[in-house]
Image (cartoon, helix red, strand yellow):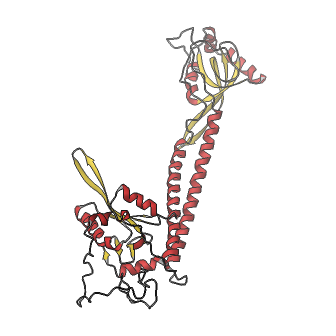
Amino acid sequence: MLCPNCKTENKDGALYCASCGAPLPKAGTAKTEPAAAPTGAPDPMAPPTVPRDTHELLHPAMQKQPVFLPRRPHDEQASGKTKAYLAKRRVFVGIAAVFTAFFASIVLMGVVNFIKASANAKPIPAASFEPANSTVGEYVTTDLIYVLPLYQEGYEKRGVEHIETYTCLAIDVYGNMFTIETSYDYYQDALCVLEAEELPENFDAADAVTVYGDVMTPDAEIQSEIIAEVGNNAVVSNMYAHNGLRVIREPRTTLDEDDNSFAVFFFAVWLAAAVGFLVCMIKRLRRAQVLFAAYGNFVDLGEAVKAAPLYQDARLCVNADYLVSRKNPLLFAHTSDVLCVYQYEHRTRFLLVSSTDKLALIVHDRYGEKMAFYYKPNAKEKGVIQQAIRYMAPLFPNAVFGYTKENLQYVATYQIDV
């Protein structure tokens, strides 16, 4: 029995063509075959006959319901190229999952640390020109007349010592004594003034030294030592008598400026990229498994299409049964599964000049794949896309052509969720 679609001879009584899968006419209903064409090698690139009715070509969904051909069961013992391809994809998905988990853990740690630091941050009161009365507590503004550094903390980089914090003993204008732990920047001006041999020319008896820090009460032994030190210091005694000198710096909170927010943002961007990549790979892997179940060894089938295409260019190959990409084995579809084909062109406009910067042939299939075949953005390649559509139009029985609202609705109606 001769197949009316691909002209392949099949066994009598067969329901479907063994070559293309098209349904065969029942016995006694087959139409008389036309006279054989003249012998000779036909032009392989001759365009197929295109329907005269443009509306019928562009809107077949409005004319009739699509008819999808049944799939032939694939041979589990066939060539292992597809299985090897799927195994490789699973390895890539596993690697992507590991990197995604790594970036997620770093971002989570950064967010947790930031929340803890924000919760523990204690604002330093704004500087006041009025004398401060509180002397013991956390982060108070204190008017000092004497400061004695006990020890400092910091780090050494390239042979240079960088001081971060001072722990000092201090006496304020009210005769109170305490320990202050404060940053280097806040304390430096106060130390310079208090250790000066002479009072500044603009000395004002109403001023006093103001610093910011964590205030603690010193033990009795240290108190006795600092009292003796103050008694032998004429400059300190003079400043104490005149109520001291005020040095004011901008207040800030105890939340460290270097809170790793940039690192958290950096890894968050990488996390978003990793999640997107992982989701894309999982979707491609699931679709590959569906293709394997529907078509069999689609890698081998793709190679067969490339060997004997009805139409081909630098991006794709098509025969009566399959459309396949020349580069990506997963860009693969049965001709009866193609739902929509259109040309995509992105143009950039600057003032009165516009230019094409992206050109592609887009193919939607019923398995939810949006296959994009990119061409160079020029007039010659645009002609190649239009020629490809003319060749492929008669080969896709269920496809609509053009980017229209009706066609996109047609695609959404007949797609299968993978």
Front position in the image: 65 or 357:
65
2 displayed left or right of 52:
right
Q: Position of residue 181 (x, y in %)?
A: 65, 28
Instruction: Answer above or below: position of 151 versus 172.
Output: below
Q: Residue furthest front?
A: 28
Front position in the image: 94 or 282:
282
Instruction: Answer above or below: position of 191 versus 285.
Output: above
Front position in the image: 292 or 401:
401
Residue 160 seen in render = yes
Q: Position of residue 340 (x, y in %)?
A: 37, 64
7 displayed left or right of 291:
left
Front position in the image: 177 or 371:
371
Q: Position of residue 7 (x, y in %)?
A: 35, 86
Quadrant of the rendered image containing residue 345: bottom left
The residue drawn where x is 29% and y is 72% is: 391
- Quadrant placement of the N terminus: bottom left
Q: How many marks?
A: 0
The residue drawn where x is 34% and y is 58% is: 403
Q: Position of residue 366 (x, y in %)?
A: 45, 66
